[in-house]
Amino acid sequence: MDAMALLLDRESHGKLEGPAPTPEQMELIYRAALRAPDHGELRPWRFIEYTGAGREALGAMFACAEQVDNPEVSDKTLEKACSKPLRAPVVIAVIAAVRQDHKVPRIEQVISAGCAAHAMLYAAHAQGLGAMWRTGGFAHHHSVHQAMGLEGEDELVGFLYLGHCAGGDRMPRPLDPRDFVERIEA
Ligand SMILES: Cc1cc2nc3c(=O)[nH]c(=O)nc-3n(C[C@H](O)[C@H](O)[C@H](O)COP(=O)(O)O)c2cc1C
């Protein structure tokens, strides 16, 4: 795929189905992540891949977060939380593993992890896979962070849902760069 076409045409796919990406496809997705811009070569990235029955462990974390917030939570809400990771054959938690008290500020380390996630979306698209970056309240919930072993100033930048496109996505609205760019000329 042409590089500019990749950059201009990537889109998110919320409806994903199996089969799961192959190990070779996943390898390329992670290799793309590891090319993220990285001030100070801190490699402030950590990925946890949930696949197959492993996704149930993630669903259990989401349900636990619901219970922490409301011990009286309904079974329906718990079931909904449990089923969220089942929306794709693979879900990857992308974590900024932040080096504290470093001259590279935390924000730059978190941005680097965000760039890694973005690169993973492109690597999925380039291989004909579908992907979507999601967060929601669970990505910022302390009980989910604890279960995933986040420490100190770490940040869970999001969950990447990966699989094959099942269709039904709406086309992104084209945007005009002139609406966003301010040009200063001498
Ligand atoms: C950090 C981050 C978190 C996001 N979280 C969600 C989310 O929880 N749910 C959702 O529907 N979209 C979420 N999105 C937006 C989608 O990933 C996607 O970008 C959006 O639907 C637009 O589609 P497009 O990527 O095809 O332009 C998030 C995007 C980012 C960058």
Image: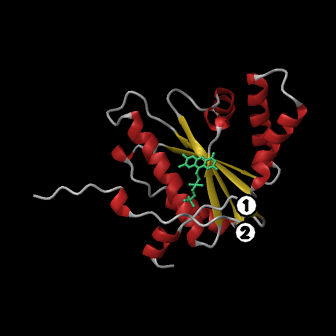
Please give left or right for residue 182 compared with residue 13 in the image: left
Find residue 80 and report its image quarter. Answer: top right
| Mark drawn on residue 15 | 1
Query: Which residue does the image show at 40% across and 37% down from the upper left?
Result: 107
Q: Amino acid at mark 2?
A: Gly
- Judged from this view, the residue extending furthest toward the top is 71
Do the residues under discs 2 and 1 have CB atoms within 8 angstroms? yes
Please give left or right for residue 151 compared with residue 81 in the image: left
Which of 6/39 is in front?
Answer: 6
- Judged from this view, the residue extending furthest toward the right is 75
Query: Which residue does the image show at 87% across and 29% down from the upper left?
Result: 74
Q: Percent from the top left, x then y, of residue 126?
A: 56, 71
Find residue 89 and report its image quarter. Answer: bottom right
What residue did someone put label 2 on?
A: 167
Quarter of the figure with the C terminus: bottom left
Which of 138/60 is in front?
Answer: 138
Q: Look at the picture and state if 71 lies above or below 139.
A: above
Query: Which residue does the image show at 67% across and 36% down from the upper left?
Result: 138
In terms of secondary structure, where does tag 1 sit? Answer: loop
